Image (cartoon, grey):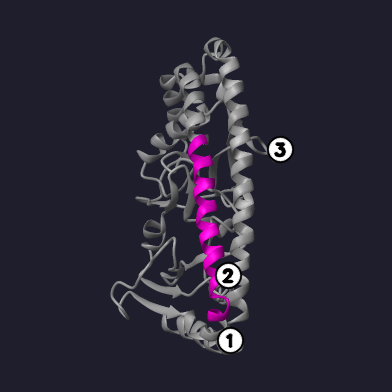
């Protein structure tokens, strides 16, 4: 699994769970949609298919679960136009034209209903607990967004949009499209059961790092995006998990150039200092409010990660019940045949 072909297609956000599955997997001509509970082997099957495709030299993208980045929600075999998706809640997917553009793979065929029934009350209890905890975590994320509105109220008036747009136009002048390009959504950050996660998938030959400054960095990256958008360049766009209407990363595959929010990690990183585009006097006047908002957001962030940690306990408890009820020997035999079939039929 290449680190540069790993993304998210959903987010735990201020508005709850947000899915970009339609946009991400809609690019494919044929979809294999997996059904089955937690622990039934959906992620393992997709990882195996991805590895088999890579061994044959096919470019493969892995779409990670935003709640658990150790798990896979889908893979895209780009060279074949084929994908495999976890079609269970919360990112429900179903077949459209069976056998024409999609088909169902039901891993529920391999579980022992009697064993599951013996633990039904425990599973129901943990599912209810998990749902309650998600609601609490989403309340924290929503409160974080409201606190950010206080920050924006102080910092956004200090931002010089005209100067930023002029800079963006000069900066992006060097990038010339090779052909009329498409923009693809590929998220690179998330929050979930393993805390906050930022992928290195946009790491490129040339990396521009936009220095954070009271959220004005998002105004600057948007100005850069708007300038690039006019050129019809091939782009991969990432949106913030907290606010999925806000861009937090851009990758230009043809030029191998990226723009992301953060501090320089490598000596070769090109830092864009956001301070150049703000009125420091106005920011200084709001210093106390900005510091207070940051403390509030940090506290809410800590609360959210605590709730997600509790979600993990409930989730893996549910998963263990399904693992114990699965016939993995039969599942492995059948899925190995399925992988061969997929790769042979779609060459």
Q: Residues within 10 Å of mark 3 (few under 14, many from 20)?
A: few
Q: Is the magenta region chiefly helix, strand or loop?
A: helix
Q: Is 83 left, or right, of 320 in this rendering?
A: left
Looking at the image, tell me whether mark 3 or mark 2 is earlier in sequence order. 2
Q: Is residue 329 above or below residue 240?
A: below
Q: Marks 3 and 2: which is nearer the front? A: 2
Instruction: Point out the tag, 3 or 1, that comes first from the N-terminus.
Output: 3
Compared to residue 83, the image places residue 259 above or below, namely above
- Nearer to the camera, 154 or 142: 142
Contact between labelled residues 2 and 1, with CB atoms less than 8 Å apart: no
Residue underneath mark 3: 267
Residue that appears at 41% across and 69% down = 81
Question: Which residue is the site of mark 2?
Answer: 122
Residue 259 lies, in percent from the top left, at 53, 40
Residues rendered magenta in the picture: 116-143
Between marks 1 and 2, how big is the CA–CA gap?
A: 21 Å
- In the displayed structure image, the side of residue 266 where residue 138 appears, left or right: left
Q: Position of residue 21 (x, y in %)?
A: 41, 59
Task: Write the residue at 55% across / 76% down.
Answer: 40
Residue 129 lies within the magenta run? yes
User: Does 174 sit above or below residue 278?
Assistant: below
Q: For the residue labelled by badge 2, is the local secondary structure a helix, a strand or a loop? A: helix
Task: Name the quadrant containing residue 232.
Answer: top left
Label at residue 327: 1
């Amino acid at each position: 699994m290449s680190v540069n072909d790993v993304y998210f297609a959903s987010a735990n956000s201020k508005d709850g769970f947000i899915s970009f599955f339609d946009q991400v997997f809609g690019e494919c001509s044929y979809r294999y949609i997996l059904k089955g509970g937690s622990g039934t082997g959906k992620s393992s099957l997709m990882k195996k298919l991805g590895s088999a495709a890579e061994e044959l030299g096919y470019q493969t993208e892995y779409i990670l679960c935003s709640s658990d980045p150790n798990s896979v929600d889908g893979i895209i075999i780009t060279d074949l136009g084929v994908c495999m998706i976890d079609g269970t809640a919360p990112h429900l997917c179903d077949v459209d034209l069976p056998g024409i553009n999609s088909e169902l793979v039901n891993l529920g065929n391999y579980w022992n209903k009697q064993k599951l029934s013996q633990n039904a009350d425990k599973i129901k209890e943990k599912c209810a607990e998990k749902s309650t905890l998600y609601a609490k975590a989403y309340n924290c994320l929503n409160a974080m967004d409201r606190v950010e509105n206080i920050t924006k109220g102080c910092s956004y008036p200090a931002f010089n949009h005209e100067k930023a747009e002029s800079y963006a136009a000069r900066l992006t002048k060097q990038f010339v499209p090779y052909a009329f390009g498409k923009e693809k959504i590929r998220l690179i950050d998330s929050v979930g059961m393993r805390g906050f996660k930022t992928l290195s998938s946009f790491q490129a030959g040339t990396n521009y790092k936009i220095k954070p400054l009271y959220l004005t960095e998002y105004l600057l990256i948007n100005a850069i995006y708007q300038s690039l958008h006019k050129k019809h360049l091939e782009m991969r766009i990432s949106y913030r998990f907290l606010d999925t209407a806000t861009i937090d990363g851009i990758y230009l595959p043809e030029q191998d150039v990226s723009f992301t929010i953060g501090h320089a990690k490598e000596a070769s990183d090109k830092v864009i200092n956001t301070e150049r585009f703000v009125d420091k006097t106005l920011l200084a006047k709001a210093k106390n409010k900005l510091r207070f908002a940051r403390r509030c957001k940090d506290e809410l962030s800590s609360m959210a990660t605590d709730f997600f940690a509790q979600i993990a306990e409930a989730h893996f408890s549910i998963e263990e019940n399904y693992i114990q009820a699965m016939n993995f020997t039969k599942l492995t035999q059948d899925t190995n045949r399925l992988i061969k079939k997929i790769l042979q039929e779609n060459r």
